[in-house]
Image (tube, rainbow, N blue to C red):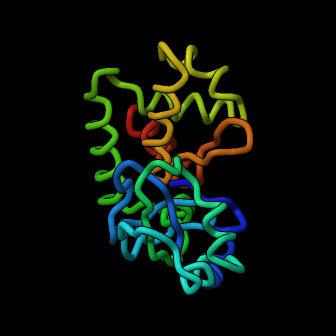
Amino acid sequence: MLFRQDALDRIRDGRVSVVFRRWRQARVRAGSRLRTMIGLVEIRSVDKVDDVTEDDAAKAGYASADALRGDIPGDAAHQLFRMEVGYAGADPRIELRSHDALSAAEFAELTARLDRMDRGRHGPWTRDVLALIAARPAVRAGDLFAEAGYPDMLSFKRDVRRLKELGLTESLDVGYRLSPRGSAALTRMRDASS
């Protein structure tokens, strides 16, 4: 579920607590948390509704129900969903990225996770991709995927996102770089293998 930046800012500030979408079926569940540009947005409730009210419009940051109706994303032929939302804090990956003083247990757990990822259909890739990003920061994914042995850019980007989930990489305006955690982990893995 995508949000415009102005809506995200108002959700973070508490000025917006309700959003609407038109979908064939609900695409989010109550209790889920979405990663956004501002951090986590919690979906507190999801309900099918027939229309919007003036009270809903105010909670959604609109001057009137008519103004809100004219700005609801999605196909007008689809069901209308009302969601209560709230800011749920910073993206935990951001803090994780800076955690570079890995204990022996943390390092063992991280390398075990990377080993499990390496057992997938693509074969061992995690250390190679980390090393490539370390050697070529801020280089477009379109210029890296073939060098990393990937048949297409989308599968490469998917795997880089998996490393990002572990706090090892960061997305830049162009390309990627290793986080402090990623740099520390790669150094330790190299030291352990030599």
Q: Residue at x 68, y 76 (%)?
A: 62
Look at the picture and state if 98 lies above or below 66. Answer: above
Q: Residue at x 58, y 54 (%)?
A: 73
Look at the picture and state if 139 lies above or below 45. Answer: above
Is residue 50 toward the left or the right of residue 40 in the image? left
**Quadrant for the C terminus in the image:** top left
> Residue 1: x and y, percent?
50, 54
Q: Is residue 16 visible?
A: yes
Q: Nearer the viewer, residue 191 or 189?
A: 189
Is residue 18 toward the left or the right of residue 108 in the image? right
Look at the picture and state if 4 lies above or below 124. Answer: below
> Residue 116: x and y, percent?
26, 37
> Residue 136: x and y, percent?
68, 30
Image label count: 0
Q: Is residue 100 visible?
A: no
Look at the picture and state if 132 lies above or below 183. Answer: above
> Residue 90: x and y, percent?
55, 71
Is residue 20 toward the left or the right of residue 48 in the image? right
Q: Residue at x 50, y 48 (%)?
A: 168
Is residue 102 toward the left or the right of residue 71 in the image? left
Q: Residue at x 35, y 24 (%)?
A: 124
Quarter of the image holding residue 172? top right
